[in-house]
Image (cartoon, rainbow, N blue to C red):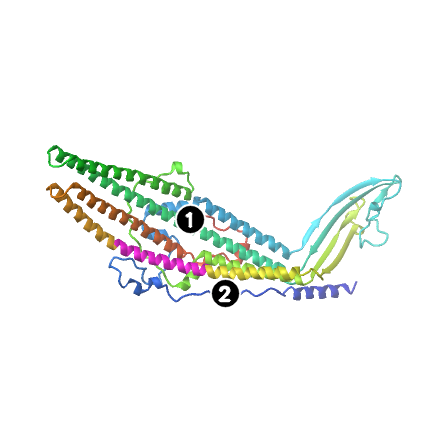
Amino acid sequence: MDAKPPILSAAAICIALLSGCNVGPKYTKPAAPTPPAFKESSPAAYSQAPPGAWQPAKPEDAVLKGKWWEMFNEPELNTLEDQLDINNQNIKQYFQNFMAARAEVREARAGYFPTVTANPAYTKGGGGALSSAAAISGTGAGAGSTGGATPTGGSGIYSSISLPIDVSWEPDLWDRVRNTVREYQYAAQVSAADLENERLTEQADLAAYYFQLRGQDALQGLYNRTIEVDRQALDLTRALLETGIDDQEAVDQTQVTLENAQEAAIGIATNRAIYEHAIAMLIGQPASSFSMAVKNLTTPLPAIPVGVPSELLQRRPDIAAAERTMAAANALIGVEKAAYYPTLSLTGSGGLQSSSIGRLLSIPALFWSLGASAAETIFDAGLRNATVAQYTAQYNADVAAYKQTVLTAFQQVEDYIATLRVTSEQLERQQAAIGTSERYVTHETSRYQTGLDPYLNVITAQLTLLSNQETQVALRVNEMTAAVELIQALGGGWNVTELPAARQVTSKEAPRQAGDTP
């Protein structure tokens, strides 16, 4: 009895020392190629731009805010975005995926602790001789113990009552459990970043659809005005026909022009309905019960803060997800490397066993046992080597995916900065073309009314003006959607500091759901 405490103490010391051995590789975030500045936002890129062309916000250290859509000063868009954050079903789905990932972290943490089981039992039987089941007595109950089952009287009937408790524990000697927990914590952070990336995608889609719909409204207004002008022209040509100044050909040409404009105006309603239905879906409403009033596209283009490329690595949730995926893959290598080393299992059991309830709480009814075992794989035909090689290759693939995600982010920002700059320059030139086209229509209409030119010249001038006006509307829509896409490419005001820490994904406290007030 005197030797047991030193042995147990030595075992505990050995376990404590070994449990600090992490056999997995240390994770180091790989460097990503980061240029010093965005080429398309440099002053040289705007040196030849007209005075009204778009430029990034100054100073350059300005940053996007969380509700980035508010910079457009569209109250209706603000209301729709708030509804999306509450009711969008895709966001809800990603949120529940995040909750499942958090639960997996707690499942992995259970490996730190022993497993305790209880198996209470009561048996009663009889026969000519006392069966082996009735002869069981508790280990450690002492010689001559009456703690086990005994016959009742001389009839051979016996009873047994037992309340055993078993404990088993496998110490985390090589950080297998710890690396497993880390893997699931990083995976939960990936899920959190995916949630924010999905939220940003849905928000950007809603804003883009909103401006596309308003573009259709602007186009509808343009065709409504064109149809009114064509009706007036038809009335004029008919009046000139009746007075003998013009002929039927001019009336027919005017009639065809009017009908073509009416047909095109009807087609616009289809595109508007499609965008309206898409908005309803994003905010979680049935398309059949959702509608938006007609409103022209008059939103001015805001100056968007671009910042510097190094900040982009901290702003985009997809980059954060790619980086956390690497960390999870690195931790998984540590889990698999722990398989090279032996495992230690500690077991213990104890409880009470007696033939009657009255004697169940007596000292002779007490039994206990302690045990330990170690296991080591001697031969597995290269299974462990292959498994580690597999996860090492997966980690290297994740490193390449991370760097590719960063490169894609830089490309997207450069693309949309260039798109905004060029589109704004096009709009400046297009406005000048519209002014010239209006003068062309006025000139040809005057010559027709004085009999100098046929009405076909007026139609040509009108179609030129209409084409330029359509182009202007299309450019305005492209400009607004490019602004939304640039904001999305910049991360939409998100920052990696908003990613939940390891202790937060482990906590049982529920995180903020979509639409909750933080």
Query: Is 129 contained in the magenta span?
Result: no
Query: Is 409 contained in the magenta span?
Result: yes
Q: Circle 1 is placed at which residue position?
A: 202
Element under disc 1: helix
Where in the figure is residue 420, as x and y percent of width and height? 32, 56
Residue 304 in sight: no
Among all residues in the image, which is located at the extreme top? 242
Q: Amino acid at mark 1?
A: Glu
Q: Quadrant of residue 493?
A: bottom left
At horizontal 67% and vertical 53% (from top left) the residue drawn is: 115
Callout 2 touching callout 1 (CB < 8 Å): no
Label number found at residue 27: none
Q: Amino acid at mark 2?
A: Pro
Q: Earlier in the sequence, mark 2 or mark 1?
A: 2
As drawn, 14 above or below 510: below
Where in the figure is residue 388, as x and y percent of width and height? 61, 61
Q: Circle 2 is placed at which residue position?
A: 30
- Magenta residues, dominant SS class: helix
Say left or right for 249 vs 381.
left
Say left or right for 156 vs 301.
right
Q: Which residues are magenta?
A: 405-427
At horizontal 40% and vertical 49% (from top left) the residue drawn is: 203
